[in-house]
Image (cartoon, rainbow, N blue to C red):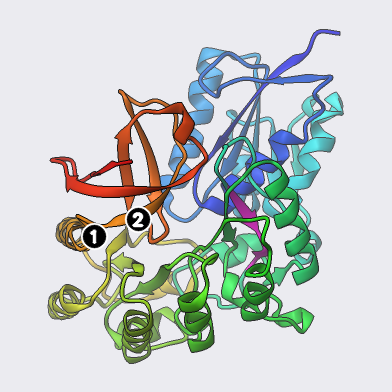
Amino acid sequence: MIKKRIAFHTLGCKLNYSETSFLSQNIDKEKFTEVPFGSEADIYVINTCTVTATAEKKCRQIANKIKNRNPEAKVIFMGCYSELKHLELENFDGVDVIIGGPNKPQLLDVLNDDSYFDTKSSLIDPNSREEFFSTWSSGERTRSFLKIQDGCDYHCSYCAVALARGDSRSDSIENVVKNVKTIAKEGIKEIILTGVNIGDFGRKNGESFYELLVELDKVEEMDRIRISSIEPNLLTDEIIELVSKSKRIMPHFHIPLQSAKSEILKMMKRRYNVELFTNRIKTIKELIPHACIAIDLICGFPGETDDFFEESFDYLNELPISYLHVFTYSLRPDTPAEMMKNHVPERSKKERSSRLHKLSDKKKLAFYKQFIGKEMDVLFESTNSKGFIEGFTGNYIRVKTEFDPELINNIVKVNLKEIDKDGNVLGEV
C-alpha cells in the first residue's frame, strides 16, 4: 500500500503546539508518512489560531498557498479559528475539512476515512467543549509541553479564546504525574506545564494547581518542571514559596499583566488590579531574587489614552521584570470590547508597541548582565547551528556555546562569559 504524505503546521500558542505534536505522533504509521510542512504532501493539517485578525488571515494565506501549489492536496483546519468561524470557513475554498477546537482528537478518525474528503466536512460539537484530553509534545529531545488544563471561565472582554475552547476543565493530579513519568522515559529532561488558564487547574475536581506542583516536585524521574503563563490572582504566595525551595520547579514566571492601569484592567474584566500585580512581583523578587519574570501586555486597548500609556510606561520601566511579551490589541468579533468606545488609532498602537519592545530589550539585557561571570546549569537542546549549540538556564537565560554533540539533552555547568551584539549570552563549558 502506498502511504499518503501528511504535513502538520501550528499557529498560535504552546497549547496548540502540544496538541499538534501529540496528534501527529498518533497517526496510523502504516497509512501515513509525515513530511515537513514545506514539502509536497497529500494532506496538510493546520492547527489554527484566532487570537488576532492577523492570525486568522495567516491561516487563510497558508491554505491558499497550498492550493495554488497543489490543487489536489487536501487541507484540514482544526482549532480555535475553525471553532469560531466554521460558517465563514465553509465558504472558503482553501479548506476541505473543518474540525473544531475540542474536536481535535477526531482528526485521527478523519484521516482513516476518505469519505470526509468527498465533500466539505465540518466537525463542530459544542458539547465536546466539556471534555478534556491530555496531550504532550514529542519529537524534541529535551523539552515537552504537557497540557494539564483547557478552556477558561474568565471571559475577559477582549478575548475570544474562551469562546473557542469552552469552560475551564483539567486533568487529574494522578494522571498528570503518570504522564510526566511516561515523558521522562522518552529521555525528556524538562516539561512545561501548559493550558489556557493553568492556575485554575483542578478547581472543579477538588484539587489545586499548588497541590499538583507539590506532587510533581516529588517526581525524581524529571529533572526540570517549568510553569507556563499563570494569572497573577492565581499565583499564590504558597506557589511562589514552593518554587523558591524547589530544585525541580524552575524559577521562571510568565505572568499576564495586560495593562498597567487598574481602570483598563477593570474594563478588560481582569480579576486583579495593579496593586495586586505589584505585590506578586515584590514577593517573587524577595523570595527568588534570581527569578526570570516575563509579563504579557496588551498595547492599545480601547480607552488607553496618551496619559494612561505614559503612566503605564513609567510603571513598567521601574518594575523589576526581565522582559515583556507585547501584543497589539486586535478587535475580536462577539467580544464585549468590540462595542467599547475610544478605540486607539492604529498609528498610535504601532508607536506604543515599538516603545514597549525597546523597553523589553533593555530589561532583558539588564537581566542577563546580572549573571555574567557566574556559573549556571544549562540544559542544551539544539543541534549544530553555525558551530554553536544553545540551551537555557533554570531562570530562562538563553546560552550558546561551541557545538559539542555530547552536550545535547544534558544539564551541564556553564560559565556565562559575555553578551554578544545580538543579545545572546555566550558561555564556556
- Location of the C terminus by quadrant is top left
User: Is 194 drawn above or below residue 336 in the view shown?
Assistant: above
Q: Amino acid at mark 1?
A: Phe
CA neighbours of label 2 inside 10 A, class few (<14), some (14 to 19), many (20+): many
Residue that badge 2 annotates: 376
Answer with left or right where residue 251 lies relative to residue 68.
Answer: left
What is the number of callouts on the image?
Answer: 2
- In the rendered image of this protein, does residue 314 appear above or below residue 89? below
Spot occupied by residue 146 in the image (x, y as percentages of width and height):
64, 55
Give the percent coordinates (x, y) of residue 392.
Answer: 40, 49
Marked residue nearer the N-terminal end (1 or 2): 1
Q: Quick one: quadrant of the N terminus? A: top right
Residue in view at x 29 percent, y 63 percent: 324
Residue 238 to residue 325: above or below: below
Instruction: State the residue at coordinates (73%, 81%).
Output: 207
Q: CA distance from mark 1 to mark 2?
A: 9 Å
Give left or right: position of 194 versus 58. Answer: right
SS for dot 2: strand
Q: Which is more toward the observer, 281 or 341?
A: 281
- Horizontal and vertical percent position of residue 247: 51, 67
Residue 145 lies in the magenta stretch: yes
Tags 1 and 2 touching, CB below 8 Å: yes
Q: Which residues are magenta?
A: 144-151
Q: Amino acid at mark 2?
A: Met
- Residue 393: x and y in percent read 39, 54
- Residue 371: mark in rendering: 1
Taking depth in this image into account, of 320 and 16 the one nearest to the observer is: 320
At x 55%, y 42%, the residue is 142
